[in-house]
Image (cartoon, rainbow, N blue to C red):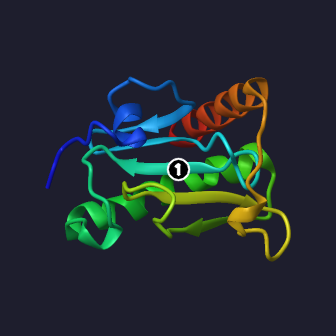
């Protein structure tokens, strides 16, 4: 397994080579806003280590990925006032394992074809809301 892939956009985000709207990070993971969200507040959680396929993650990292989702989902819920936070892994859009957390307001909203452009201002505001909410939840 490679720690890094110089052609991977997510590895570049981990290494600070591409700007991102980071809402949370730990020793093993980075969570940031999707810049083409299904709904504003859509967060991607990625392992810092470059592993293409989620089922190739070690059992420990796999479990920690989902525990991280459980930490971040309440902040998305509160920041977006959504009814639910959906979770998905499909893995075809980027060759780096990642978990999608998507704010949902009605049924049938997890369709990736719903992804759309949002402004940098909207992303920046949502980043602040989620980060502030994470801080208040954890305090």
Instruction: Say how many tags the image has.
Output: 1
Task: Name the spot of residue 111 as percent of width and height, x first.
Answer: 72, 69
Task: Name the spot of residue 128 as percent of width and height, x first.
Answer: 66, 27
- Which residue is label 1 attached to? 44
Furthest residue in direction front, as rendered: 7
- Residue found at x 18% / y 44%: 3
Task: Name the spot of residue 25 as percent of width and height, x first.
Answer: 40, 37
State whether residue 34 is above or below residue 99: above
State the residue in front, 113 or 59: 113
- Residue found at x 22% / y 70%: 59
Crowding near pointer 1: few (<14 within 10 Å), some, many (20+)? many
Q: Quadrant of the N terminus?
A: bottom left
Furthest residue in direction left, as rendered: 1
- Residue found at x 59% / y 55%: 73
- Residue found at x 55% / y 59%: 100
Q: Quadrant of residue 9?
A: top left
């Amino acid at each position: 397994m490679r720690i890094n892939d110089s052609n991977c956009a997510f590895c570049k985000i981990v290494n600070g080579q591409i700007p991102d709207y980071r809402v949370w990070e730990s020793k093993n993971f980075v969570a940031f806003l999707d810049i083409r969200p299904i709904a504003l507040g859509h967060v991607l959680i990625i392992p810092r280590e470059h592993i293409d396929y989620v089922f190739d993650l070690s059992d420990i990292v796999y479990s920690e990925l989902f525990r991280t989702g459980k930490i971040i989902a309440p902040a998305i819920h509160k920041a977006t006032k959504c009814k639910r936070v959906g979770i998905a892994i499909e893995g075809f859009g980027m060759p780096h394992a990642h978990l999608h957390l998507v704010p949902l307001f009605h049924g049938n909203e997890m369709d990736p074809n719903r992804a759309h452009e949002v402004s940098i201002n909207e992303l920046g505001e949502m980043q602040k809301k989620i980060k502030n909410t994470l801080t208040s939840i954890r305090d």
